[in-house]
């Protein structure tokens, strides 16, 4: 079902301004990037000279995360918390890359809750090299900013 939907939604060719049909994916991507650059890119863009450090943003907000909230954000969600989250999602949204809508996950979760949790855990484990690295960095940033610590000049310049 996913492959059928993807084949209907796929762009198979572009027609250039000269009327030439372009079917090569690399040429199509170059043409698309150039097209949107011509529309969206500013005429005379120069990057800002100012550098805003993370500590500057933290001072603007003035929010300090409490120790219990930091611990709560860093804890692994339970099966019940994940179930509640899925049940809050709109079931009529478009499907994701796996072809499943939140409604189908909702229906499956009502009939087989333990299998649903293990299915989701397996999905996350397959993505762990990407997702967990990003989450780990994001939570470290939240922890450091929330506790009022700085992250050091190396990351501030980043």
Image: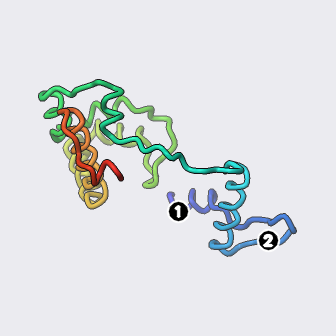
The percent coordinates of residue 63 (x first, y second) are 27, 25
Q: Which mark is residue 107?
A: none
Residue at image x 31%, y 32%? 58
Name above or below for residue 73 compared with residue 38: above
Which residue is label 2 attached to? 21
Q: Farthest residue in the right direction? A: 18
Q: Answer left or right for 43 relative to 152.
A: right
Residue toward you, 65 or 82: 65
- Label 2 element class: strand
How many C-alpha atoms fall within 10 Å of the one at disc 1: few (<14), some, or many (≥20)? few
Q: Which mark is residue 3?
A: 1
Q: Are marks 2 and 1 in contact (CB under 8 Å)?
A: no
Of pointers 2 and 1, the one earlier in the residue sequence: 1
Q: Farthest residue in the front direction? A: 49
Name above or below for residue 141 compared with residue 85: below
The reply to whether residue 79 is visible in this rendering is: no
Q: In 3D space, how far apart are the residues under numbered discs 2 and 1 (Cα atoms)?
A: 25 Å
The reply to whether residue 144 is visible in this rendering is: yes
The percent coordinates of residue 115 (x first, y second) are 22, 48
**Applied colour scheme:** rainbow
- Label 1 element class: helix
How many C-alpha atoms fall within 10 Å of the one at disc 2: few (<14), some, or many (≥20)? few
Q: Answer left or right for 32 relative to 88.
A: right
Q: Answer left or right for 43 relative to 48.
A: right
Residue toward you, 52 or 63: 52
Residue at image x 40%, y 33%? 89
Residue at image x 25%, y 38%? 142
The percent coordinates of residue 117 (x first, y second) are 22, 45
């Amino acid at each position: 079902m996913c492959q059928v939907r993807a084949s209907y939604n796929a762009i198979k060719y572009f027609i250039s301004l000269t009327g030439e049909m372009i079917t090569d994916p690399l040429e199509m991507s170059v043409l698309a990037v150039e097209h949107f650059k011509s529309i969206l890119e500013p005429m005379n863009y120069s990057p800002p000279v100012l550098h805003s450090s993370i500590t500057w943003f933290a001072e603007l907000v003035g929010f300090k995360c409490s120790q219990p909230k930091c611990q709560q954000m860093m804890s692994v969600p339970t099966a019940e918390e994940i179930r509640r989250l899925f049940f809050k999602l709109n079931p009529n949204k478009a499907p994701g890359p796996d072809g499943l809508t939140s409604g189908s996950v909702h229906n499956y979760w009502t009939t087989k809750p333990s299998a649903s949790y293990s299915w989701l855990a397996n999905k996350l484990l397959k993505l762990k090299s990407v997702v967990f690295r990003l989450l780990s960095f994001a939570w470290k940033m939240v922890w450091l900013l929330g506790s009022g610590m700085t992250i050091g000049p190396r990351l501030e310049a980043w």
